Image (cartoon, rainbow, N blue to C red):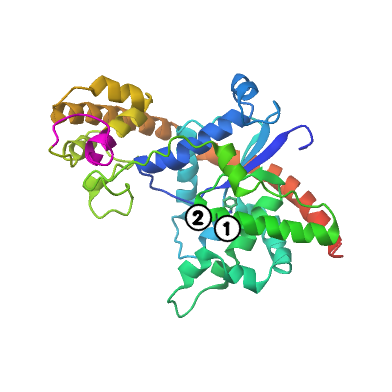
Amino acid sequence: MSTTSAPTILTGLRVNSEFTLGNFLGALLPMVRLANAHSGANPANQAHSANTESTQPSHINIFVPDLHSIIAEVDGELQQNLIKSLKYYLAAGLKLTPHVHLYRQSRVPAHSELCWILNCVASMGELNRMTQYKDKSEGKDSVNVGIFDYPVLMAADILLYDAVYVPVGEDQFQHLELTRRLAQRFNNRFGEIFTLPAEPKDQIKFMNLSEGIRIRDLQNPEKKMSKSAASENSKIMLSDDPTAVKKKIMSATTDSVGKIQFDMFNQPGISNLLQIEAIVTGLPLQDVISTWAGETHYGDLKQKVAESVSTFLATFQAKLAEIPDSAVLDLLAAGETYANEVANAKLYQVQKAFHLR
Ligand code: TRP
């Protein structure tokens, strides 16, 4: 199945029912662009992409690590939130081709089984060194084993599908390194069964993330916009009411310089508004900056950005509302059939290596 394809791209999307505009820019859009550029959705794009070794489409595996979710408290909302998160990616423009596969980790039992087998390859010492584990267990009386074993399940997620490119945040690079180490150790013992995912530096090159724009908190523009900010006025949520959101923009913190220019250091509030305008209109930041060069009325800028954000949210929410749950469930059913087939074939090779078959 994969012999005629370019390297597989795989990512796990944490269940997230609330996205800020910052998440849209930092997580949704990059993943959607990457998928669309490699899934055969846009052949012209693919032939000219500097990143692609081949003009063949890649398999794009986008899965929800629901077994990872339960290392923490979850509730009856999990299913609904899971479907909602996937809808966000679809509304953000994820194109569906026969190479795009959506699935839930818990519906592909091979993940759990390979995790167990890899537990017998991994050492306590190397898991003890994982920063995420150290952070999550620090100062706690009792820590569940799932938190400790999290990276091994993640390795299984990746190795079952021979994934080469695994777009994740930097905080997950240590887990990627562990995945490579476990795969290498296994292959040394049993032969070339696993494909090693690319090294973090090559992952970064492949992701080709643009400019590193960070949307800032509207009230405290020195800080990045976070959904956990205490004040509602600090953040723009993709679910915000398109009319009410205008007030948030109008009350954004600015400065007393009196010039509209891009200067993140001295004028973080104004610079943030210019960035937001660029994102929601889809214009290059440079164009937005030029349009406002020489202007001095902050109120005019705010009004324009408020309008743009309002239009953007209304459009996005309309797209979201058009996607029925059943469409997502159908995609999952198809994706899970595919994923089980690929994963079980790999698992079988591993079971044979361990004389389990
Ligand atoms: N650990 C990832 C995160 O926190 C989610 C994840 C689980 C993942 N399994 C994965 C990402 C496999 C990529 C590949 O974001």
Q: Is residue 264 magenta?
A: yes
Q: Which residue is mark 2?
A: 171
* Image quarter in which the C terminus is found: bottom right
- Residue 266: percent from left, percent from top: 23, 40
Q: Is residue 75 left or right of residue 336?
A: left
Characterize the magenta stretch by its predominant secondary structure: loop
Which range is magenta? 257-273
Q: Secondary structure at mark 1?
A: helix
Q: Is residue 228 magenta?
A: no
Amino acid type at mark 2: Asp
Q: For label 1, count other residues whose C-alpha is less than 10 Å away and answer few (under 14), some (14-19) or many (20+).
A: some
Amino acid type at mark 1: Gln
- Residue 150: percent from left, percent from top: 58, 63
Q: Are marks 2 and 1 in contact (CB under 8 Å)?
A: yes
For the point 45% across and 44% down, the residue is 84
For the point 54% across and 48% down, the residue is 168
